[in-house]
Image (tube, rainbow, N blue to C red):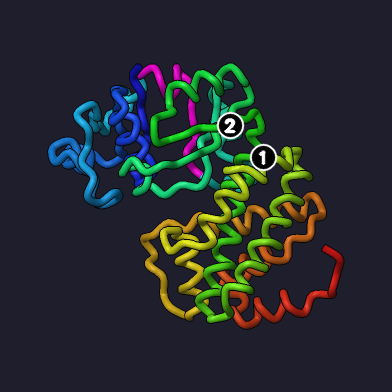
Amino acid sequence: MTISVVGAGAFGTALAIALAREGRDVTLWARDKNAAEYMQRTRANDAKVQGVSFPSRIVVTSDFHVAAQNEIILRKALIACCKGFEVSTGIGPCGILETVTDRVAILTGPSFAHDIARGLPTALTLAARDHALGQVLQTCLGTKSLRLYTTTDIVGAELGGALKNVIAIACGATMGAGLGESARAALMTRGYAEMLRMAKSLGAQPQTLSGLSGFGDLSLTCMSTGSRNYRFGVSLGRGEVFDASVTVEGAATANAALTKAKEFGLDMPITKAVDALVQGRIDVQAAIDILLTRPQKEE
């Protein structure tokens, strides 16, 4: 079985390592030619996954034609391993991939790249509209330490992975501002309610959001400094400048989610506050005041 991982970021590298460690032949594609040659020569990607060497079955290349020859991207299907929405359209990763093929899936859930690369136990959601395709991919990608659960609910899996990053920013800002863990728990809970509202409106299954790709990912991202979105929120809460070179998916996702929310007439106050905060229209104290002065309501 030959597998291509397109993208040598932290998660792509970690996934390539995990699969190659289990005896799969893996091609890891990197956009930058010099970076690809360096990784192939040094047998590591310390810039993204520090301290983990590549198994011998990994080949690194910047030639996409080489990567495209393998059976799996996947058995000529494409698997998205990213989280978010296209800002201009609100389309998720699978929707974008479906413009070129109908053999599409998404791999998402509570995971940090360094945990996967080190072989620590991790469980993820593998969503594919085609149940048979999902089962094939589950067999191809599952390892002793990487447990995959299948679903046909692509929309729910996409939404969970994207929206949890928005809530993580809010939780990080709360902790950075010194408001305490009780406030963070409240934001997580009410943020989860926002995720469910949007999921229902877009036709997702509520049980998907209660699983790994929703509640599981939300829990990890909102409570760990291993999360870029959470760290970004902490910086906002402290009034500190955040490293602009670090990707923060939730910043753009908040805006895209609001566009969808307006389309469906959804009330998403936390998402709205995060969008205003990251755009610099309000500060943390104003965001807190907006949320705390909302009318009392039933849960």
Q: Position of residue 234 (x, y in %)?
A: 48, 72
Horizontal side of residue 165 vs 26, given as left or right: right
For the residues bearing labels 1 and 2, Cβ distance under 8 angstroms: yes
In the rendered image, the vertical position of residue 242 relative to residue 156, given as above or below: below
Tell me if mark 1 has few (under 14), some (14-19) or many (20+) residues whose alpha carbon lies within 10 angstroms of its own.
Answer: many
* Label 2, residues with CA under 10 Å away: few <14, some 14-19, many ≥20: many
First to last magenta residue range? 69-82
Q: Nearer the viewer, residue 39 or 183?
A: 183
Q: Earlier in the sequence, mark 1 or mark 2?
A: 2
Secondary structure category for the residue under label 2: strand
Q: Quadrant of residue 12?
A: top left
The amino acid marked with disc number 1 is Thr
Task: Identify residue for label 2.
Answer: 127
Residue 212 quadrant: top right
Give the mark count: 2
Residue drawn at (77%, 44%), measured in percent from left and top? Answer: 200
**Image location (x, y in percent) of residue 154:** 63, 34
The answer to whether 68 appears left or right of 161 in the picture is left
Between label 1 and label 2, give the one nearer the viewer: 1
Q: Which residue is mark 1?
A: 208
Q: Amino acid at mark 2?
A: Ala
Q: Main secondary structure of the magenta part?
A: loop
Q: Based on the picture, tell me whether residue 77 belongs to the magenta stretch.
A: yes
Left or right side of 148 for 266 = right
Which residue is found at the position 51% from the left and 62% from the top? 223
Out of 23 and 82, give the one closest to the viewer.
Answer: 23
Q: What SS does tag 1 mark? A: helix
x%, y% of residue 133? Answer: 55, 19
Instruction: State the image coordinates of residue 108 (x, y, percent, origin top left).
Output: 52, 40
